[in-house]
Image (cartoon, helix red, strand yellow):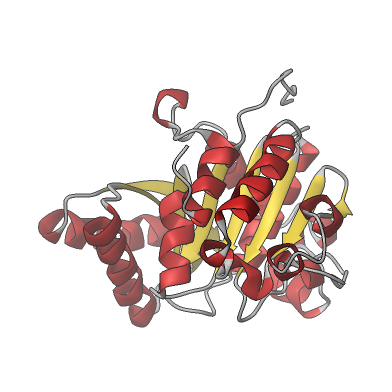
Amino acid sequence: MIRPAAIRTTKTISVTSGKGGVGKTSILCNMALELASKGAKVLILDGDFGMANVDLMFGLRAESNLWDVVSGRLMLEDVVMSVTDNIDLIPGGSGVYELQGLGVVEKYSLLQQIAELEKQYDYLLVDTAPGIADNVLYLNAAADQTVVIVTPDPASITDSYALIKVLSERYRETRFSVLCNQVKDEREGHRLFNRLSDVAAEYLTVRLEYLGSVSMDLSMRQATKTQQLVLEAFPGSVAGTEIQKLAKNLTSYPPASEARGGMRFFWNQLVGVAL
């Protein structure tokens, strides 16, 4: 069990993809559920403002989002919503992209509010939009760890490489976790990872690390259709077991010495204030 420290340093993890339709949000929410079941306190930021739907994955509908904070209508604590035991959510909306447009006073006010959140959570999981738009890139570049979800679809492989390439060249990112989804089995997952890793090693100065695989499982599809998480509906399924293993892998990466500074650093990068 993860025991909360007196003062937490929140580990920030972005979950991203080169293209849509790879199961990114479902994987993120299920991993959050597994981390929470082991005693971790998890905060999710829904950074996919085009298709923000993390709240729906938990059977809820957000009444406010980060735009209400950016526009000054609400405080951040008023926007954070509890979605289940040990998991809270910041619905992002277009407010994520507008953070850098805040004035200096508003930026520091937001960062003071973030400092209070830092004490409450072990993990900040960020669900980004797919692709290489600016809002996707700067969410990924601000996180301690970037998890890239790839599937056997050739377009997914190509677009994942493009995402890694842009983050490497534009933001000097050198380390990525790769999660292979919708594969036949673990063996195919390793083959898929090796394909992406070999190309990256040849043309980029980056280090890809295999986080794990989630197999193509009807249980996952059934859970998604009924707006449930597979770990709730089918915890003993193949996909459920694999996601439990993935969440365990997250707890050991990256080493503490390589963490960038937790939640305050992440939000500082987003709003563009040098502290």
Residue 72 on image: x %, y % = 75, 64
Q: In this view, does 122 lie to the left or right of 77?
A: left
At horizontal 69% and vertical 68% (from top left) the residue drawn is: 220
At horizontal 72% and vertical 48% (from top left) the residue drawn is: 43
Residue 272 visible to the viewer: yes
Residue 146 on image: x %, y % = 44, 51
Instruction: Decide: is 48 above or below 168.
Output: below
> Which quarter of the picture shows residue 122?
top right
Q: Observer-nearest residue: 216 or 196?
A: 196
Residue 224 on image: x %, y % = 74, 74
Residue 244 visible to the viewer: no
At horizontal 11% and vertical 57% (from top left) the residue drawn is: 202
Position of the N terminus, as image quadrant, is top right
Q: Is residue 179 left or right of residue 175?
A: right
- Hey, which residue is sitting farthest left in the picture? 202
> Which quarter of the picture shows residue 7?
top right
Instruction: Decide: is 196 above or below 172.
Output: below
Residue 241 on image: x %, y % = 66, 49
Instruction: Decide: is 96 above or below 122.
Output: below
Q: Observer-nearest residue: 21 or 144?
A: 144
Q: Observer-nearest residue: 233 or 178?
A: 178
Q: What is the tally of numbered marks visible in this picture?
A: 0
